[in-house]
Each structure stands twice: as C-alpha cells, then as structure tokens.
Image (cartoon, rainbow, N blue to C red):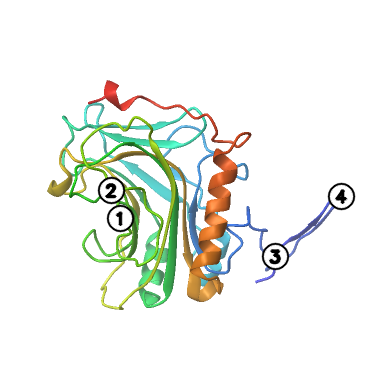
C-alpha cells in the first residue's frame, strides 16, 4: 500500500494511502506491534484500558485485519500491585512481593485478528525489542518473561526475559540477578531478541507484555520494571537483519534516555515503599 505524502503547505491524500511511520523503528513492512505511551505521535495520559498500536496501519495491511488498539489489562488490586506512569511517561509495573496474588497481573494484549495471523506466520523470523528499566529484580533461578510472542509462558517463538534471551540465540540481556532486591542502580537496558518458530504452536496468545505472577511459579518473585517501548517486527516480511533491527531499537532507546531525551532523568515510585 502506498503511503500518504506530506510536504509543508501541502497534503496529498486518497484511497489506499497510508500514514507515514511514526519513526525509523516503525518504518518496517513487517511491523506488527509498537507500544510507547509517551511517543510524540500519539501520547497517552494515565493508564487507560486501551493504548495506541503505533504500527497499527502496517499491521492491518499485512494481517488483513481491522486496525485495533492494544488492550492494557490491569487486574492488580491496591494491595497486589501498582500500574503507574513515571515522571517522564514510562509505564511502571510494580507487583507486590508480599501481597501479590497469582493471576492478578498487568498484560498488554494484541487483537484476536493479529494473534490469529501471527500463528499462520510462526515459522517466519521474528524480532522483539523492549526499552526497560528493572527497578526490582526477581528471584535467582526464576526467569520471568516481560515481552513474548507465543502460546503461553512455556511455549514461545521468541521472548524477552528479565535475565536471559528466552527462546532466542540472540540478544543483549542485563546480567542475571542473584537476589530478590532493589538494585542500587536500576538496570536500564534495550533488550532485543530474534528467533524463528518451529511451527508447532496451535495458537498465539493475545498477551504479549506480562507483569506480576501470571502463574504460581512467580508468586512473590515477580520482577518490577518500567517499560518505555515494546516493538515486534516480522523480519521475514521486513527484510531487515537482526543486526539492523537491533541497531534501530538501540538508537531509539539511546535517543530517549540520553541528555535531552524525553525519558532522561526519569523518576518513579520507590519499590521499597511497596514491599
């Protein structure tokens, strides 16, 4: 599909013309999901039930399904967890370590149509990237997924986890944590992974972003983090290499967190005040 052409003082529109991508990271023929609540193209206040998919137009084209926003499902209670915006617009996911309840979580969910389409393309190469700050680590030996494309926590095509690369042989994870603690310097990282599915999954879960104890394994052990962006791209369709995709994601991450960037100097609720 052709893109809309914009020239200062002029605007050319018409049937079949597509809005230009919001930035270089999104400028991919394989872009499926792009979540960034403070993005200048579509900033969001608070923690609403739905948030923009910044790749929605391209996702609608490649999947042949209607454009749909991302559902932000929050079942935390005031005791079991906090879902808040940080001072600079990040999304803080802060489950309690004491009063958390299995199944009371935060999950970002793609539409049914996108999940169904992704299942038909599961043997393609997929790329996931997340700009995150780990503000309270999980337990040693319990590696919690933050971002995933898969059927469930045990069966994924590709996933971004707190301390490992999940299903991928690629990635740039933060160091494995050794204790349940608030790190003295919260780990800021751009986690990027790529993998090809085996084709064995019978479905793709709508939930792609996870926070809190999604099952009993993570009771009292869930990581707390700030999400700045999450991006999912089909590399088979985009033609990008993993290295190219990772470089674009890291450039977006660096621009936002460096001096003058929109996330630089961010502050958030101290996890020690919410045990």
Which of the two labelled residues, at mark 3 and mark 4, occupies the earlier sequence position? 3
Q: Between disc 1 and disc 2, whose residue precedes? A: 1
Cβ–Cβ below 8 Å for labels 1 and 2? yes
Quote the CA–CA distance across marks 4 and 2.
Answer: 52 Å
Q: Position of residue 240 (x, y in %)?
A: 55, 70
Q: Residue furthest left?
A: 216
In the structure shown, which secondary structural element does the residue marked by tag 3 occupy?
Answer: loop
Q: Position of residue 168 (x, y in %)?
A: 34, 66
Q: Do residues under tags 3 and 4 come within 8 Å of each other at their CB atoms?
A: no
**Dot 4 surroundings within 10 Å: few (below 14), some, or many (20 or more)?**
few
**Image point (34%, 74%), residue name:** 197
Kindly indicate the quadrant of the structure image that contains residue 47: top left
Q: Secondary structure at mark 4?
A: loop
Q: Quadrant of the N terminus?
A: bottom right
- As measured in the structure, the alpha-carbon distance from the residue carrying label 1 to the one carrying label 4 is 49 Å
Q: CA distance from mark 3 to mark 2?
A: 43 Å
Q: Is residue 46 above or below residue 33?
A: above
To which residue does mark 2 refer?
176
Whether 196 is drawn above or below 232: the answer is below
The residue sitting at 52% across, 31% down in the picture is: 88
Residue designated by label 3: 3
User: Judging from the image, what secondary structure is the residue with disc 1 in?
Assistant: loop
Q: Is residue 203 left or right of residue 219?
A: right
Q: CA distance from mark 1 to mark 2?
A: 7 Å
The residue under label 1 is: 164
Q: Is residue 131 left or right of residue 97?
A: right
At label 3, counting other C-alpha atoms closer than 10 Å, the crowd grade (few under 14, some 14-19, many 20 or more) is some
């Amino acid at each position: 599909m052709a893109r809309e052409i914009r020239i200062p003082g002029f605007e050319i529109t018409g049937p079949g013309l597509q809005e230009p991508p919001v930035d270089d990271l999104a400028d991919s023929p394989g872009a499926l999901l792009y979540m960034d609540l403070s993005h200048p193209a579509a900033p969001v206040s608070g923690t609403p039930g739905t948030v923009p998919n910044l790749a929605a137009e391209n996702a609608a084209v490649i999947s042949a399904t209607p454009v749909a926003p991302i559902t932000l499902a929050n079942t935390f209670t005031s005791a079991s967890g906090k879902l808040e915006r940080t001072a600079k617009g990040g999304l803080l996911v802060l489950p309690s370590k004491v009063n958390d309840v299995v199944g009371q979580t935060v999950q970002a969910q793609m539409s049914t149509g996108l999940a169904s389409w992704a299942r038909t393309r599961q043997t393609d190469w997929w790329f996931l990237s997340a700009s995150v700050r780990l503000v309270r680590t999980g337990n040693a030996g319990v590696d919690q997924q933050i971002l995933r494309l898969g059927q469930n926590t045990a069966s994924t095509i590709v996933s971004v986890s707190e301390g490992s690369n999940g299903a991928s042989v690629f990635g740039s994870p933060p160091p494995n944590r050794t204790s349940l603690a608030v790190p003295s310097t919260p780990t800021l990282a751009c986690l990027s992974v790529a993998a090809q599915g085996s084709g064995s999954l019978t479905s793709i879960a709508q939930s792609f972003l996870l926070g809190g104890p999604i099952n009993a394994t993570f009771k009292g052990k869930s990581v707390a983090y700030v999400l700045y962006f999450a991006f999912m791209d089909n590399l088979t369709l985009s033609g990008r290499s993993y290295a190219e995709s990772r470089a674009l994601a890291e450039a977006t991450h660096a621009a936002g967190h460096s001096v003058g960037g929109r996330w630089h100097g961010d502050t958030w609720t101290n996890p020690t005040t919410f045990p």
